[in-house]
Image (tube, rainbow, N blue to C red):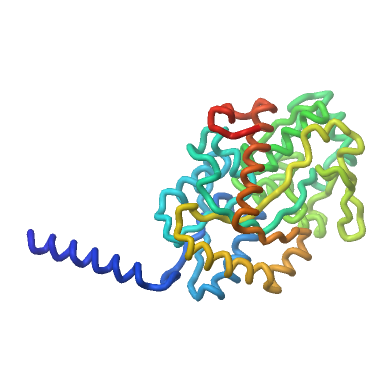
Amino acid sequence: MKRIVTLLVILTVALGAVSAQMKYPFRDITNVLVWGAGGGTDLANRLVMAEMAKELKVNINVNNVTGGVGGSVGLFEGYSRPADGYTLVGLSESCVTAAVQGGFNKKMNVWDFFIIGGSPDLISVTPSAPFKTVTDLVEAVKKNPRSVRAGASAAGSIHHLNLLAFEKGSGTKFNFIPYDSSAASQNAAMTGEVSLVITSVQEQAELIKAGRLRPLAMLIPTDFDFKGTMIPSAFTSYPGLAQYLPLEQQIGFAIRKDAPEAVKEQLQAAFKKAMNAEPVKKFGADRYFTLKGYVGKEANDIFDKLESVFSWTLWDLGAAKIDPATLGIPR
C-alpha cells in the first residue's frame, strides 16, 4: 500500500510538471455563464466564444449556472475553480450588485474583465396590452399601485435596477416578477404572465420586428430609431428619471485576476480577433448592440465604476441588504 501511495504521489507530481510545461491552452476551456440561456449575455458570449475557440484551437464550452442574486451562484462556481485560465465567467454589469445583495463575499476587483458590448433598455408590452403610451402605463399604476406585473431578469440585474429607477422617477410601484434570464422575462410578457418587460433593445429586437412585443419607451434620455420607427424616451414625460437613469449595460466575461499574465495575454489576443470577426460585427449591427472590445485596465476601471454606481444606487433605492461602505465600495 505504501508503494502504491508513493507511486501515485510521484505520478501526480510528474503530471503536474508536464502540464505546467505544455503551452496554454492544451485542453478545453469552460465559460461559466451566470445568466440563463437565450438572454443577451448568453447570446453575446456564445458568439464570441465560438470565434475565440478558432484562435485558441480548443473548444470553449458555455455552461449556464444561474441562481442567487446578481448572478452569485455562477460567480461562486467560477471563482471556486483554479485560476489557470481554463475557467471563464460569462457575466454582465448586473453582477456588480451581488455583494451588496449578500450573494457574493468579494468585490469585483478579484476579476479581470473582457467587455463585449451593450444595448440600452426599454419598456415593452404585448401588442394586446391596454397601454398605448408610457403615460397610460404610469397613470394606471398610480391609480392602483402594484396592480401591474413587471418582468425583468433577477433581482439586482440592470433590468431590475432600471425598473426600480423608473418607479422612483415616475412615482409608481409595480409588482416585480424576477426571472433567471432576459429571455424568460420576455417570454412571460408575450404569454401574458406579466404585463410589461424591461430588457435591452438587443434582446427584444427580433420580437419587436415580429410584432410579439410593442415598445412603449426607452430608458435613456433620447428617442431611439428602430428601423425607421422612433421609440420615445421616457424622460420626455418624466424628467425626474434623470436623477436615476441611464444605467449602462456592459456584457462580457471575466477571468480570475490571479491567473497567469501569459494566459490573460493570450485570451486578450484571441478576444480582440474575435471582436473583429464578421459574425460578431453582424450581430452588433443586426441587434442594435454596441460592440466595445475593452480589456485590461480599461475594462477593469469600467467595472470598478459600475460596482460603485450600481451598489450605491441600490442602497439609495432601498433595495440593498448590505451597506456598500462596509464592503469598501466608494460612492
The residue that appears at 61% across and 60% down in the rendered structure is: 45
- The residue drawn where x is 79% and y is 53% is 212
> From the viewer's perspective, is residue 278 above or below residue 172?
below
Count of marks overlaid on the render: 0
User: Where residue 272 sits in the image (x, y, percent)?
Assistant: 63, 67
Q: Is residue 331 above or below residue 275?
A: above
What x and y, as percent, mark residue 316? 68, 27
Which quadrant would the C terminus be assigned to in this image? top right
Does residue 331 show up?
yes
Could you say where residue 281 lies in the image, as x and y percent from the top left?
73, 68
To which quarter of the image does residue 220 belong? top right
Asked whether 164 or 151 is in front, the reply is 164
Residue in the picture at 24% in, 68% down:
14
Give the residue drawn at x 13%, y 62%: 6
Which is nearer the eye, 138 or 30?
30
Q: Where is residue 246 in the image (x, y as percent from the top left)?
A: 78, 41
Considering only vertical position in the picture, is 173 above or below 284?
Answer: above
Quadrant where the N terminus lies? bottom left
**In the image, is 196 to the left or to the right of 264?**
right
